[in-house]
Image (spheres, helix red, strand yellow):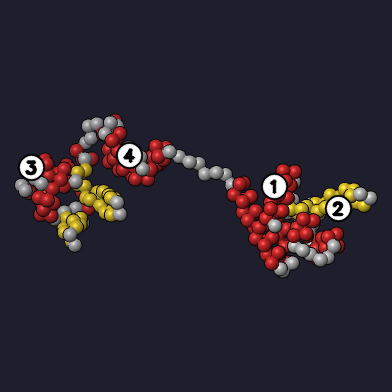
Amino acid sequence: MKELIKQTITLNLLDNPSHPVNARELHAFLEVETPFSMWIKRRIEEYGFIEGQDFTDHKFVNGKATQIDYFLTLDMGKELAMVERNEKGKEARRYFLDCEKKLKEQRQPKQLEYTPEERANIAFKSLYEIAQLVKVPESFALQECAKMATRASGCDITPLITQAAGMDKVPDKDVMLEPTELGKHYGLSGKSMNKKLAELELQVKANGEWIVTSKGEPLCERHAWAVANKSGYNLKWNWQAIDELMQNNAL
């Protein structure tokens, strides 16, 4: 069956892509006892199939007799197979469904494939435009967008950001540092700096994690991270604001 209809559909698709099923060959496969000409005419009348839409016919001389062949759409072929209500009909219908699926896949436009570098470029531009719309400081936007684009594409573009013009002479008010980086300005370890931030009532420790307080919320940004199957976030603090608090509280 598969070879018969496969050959028929393949050949007819070239000349008549809208009606690729040869009804005479389908009739033979379905093992219908009713003579072909009587069977096809009866089915057309019973189910209201429309010439030119559901089927086309082709007359030719076979010896001394005039013979008519019918070419059907996949939908009409499926329906004729289904109404026979036997195993042959089920097999033919399943094959027509498979053919229809493959034809639809061929007609669908192929998805564009991008290299990791191209994906990184697209992701970074989109994220950076959003950052500009919501007025994120340029240096911070460059760093965070580069990190997110790297995660999305698998192409690490973060080293390039250090050379960006927006990273030159970054105002103190826009510099965001993690506790370890922040502590270096005061000769403190990251652990000691976290304790200082807690003394300033900017964060508290809960379940082994530092949680920002309402007082500290305006002075920090959450920095997401992901390693293997683990993920979380670190807190980055505004250097200028923290420095002022440190000086005022003489900590």
Look at mark 3 in the image and give the residue it sits on: 187
Q: Position of residue 194 (x, y in %)?
A: 13, 51
Horizontal side of 64 relative to 244 (left or right) equals right
Look at mark 1 in the image and give the residue it sits on: 10
The reply to whether callout 4 and callout 3 are in contact (CB within 8 Å) is: no
- Toward the left, the furthest residue is 250
Res. 68 mark: 2
Front-lying residue, 8 or 189 = 8
Element assignment for label 1:
helix
Element assignment for label 3:
loop
Front tag of 1 and 3: 1
Look at mark 4 in the image and give the residue it sits on: 156
Determine crowd level at label 2: few under 14, some 14-19, many 20+ residues with C-alpha closer than 10 A: some
Q: Residue at x 18, y 56 (%)?
A: 210
Mark 1 → mark 2, Cα distance in angstroms? 21 Å
Three-letter code for the amino acid on which mark 3 is drawn: Gly
Front tag of 2 and 3: 2
Q: Position of residue 67 (x, y in %)?
A: 88, 52
Three-letter code for the amino acid on which mark 2 is drawn: Ile
Mark 4 or mark 3: which comes first in sequence?
4
Q: Position of residue 224 (x, y in %)?
A: 28, 50
Mark 1 or mark 2: which comes first in sequence?
1
Determine crowd level at label 1: few under 14, some 14-19, many 20+ residues with C-alpha closer than 10 A: few
Mark 2 or mark 3: which comes first in sequence?
2
Horizontal side of 147 relative to 11 (left or right) equals left
Mark 4 or mark 1: which comes first in sequence?
1
Residue 34: in sight, yes or no?
yes
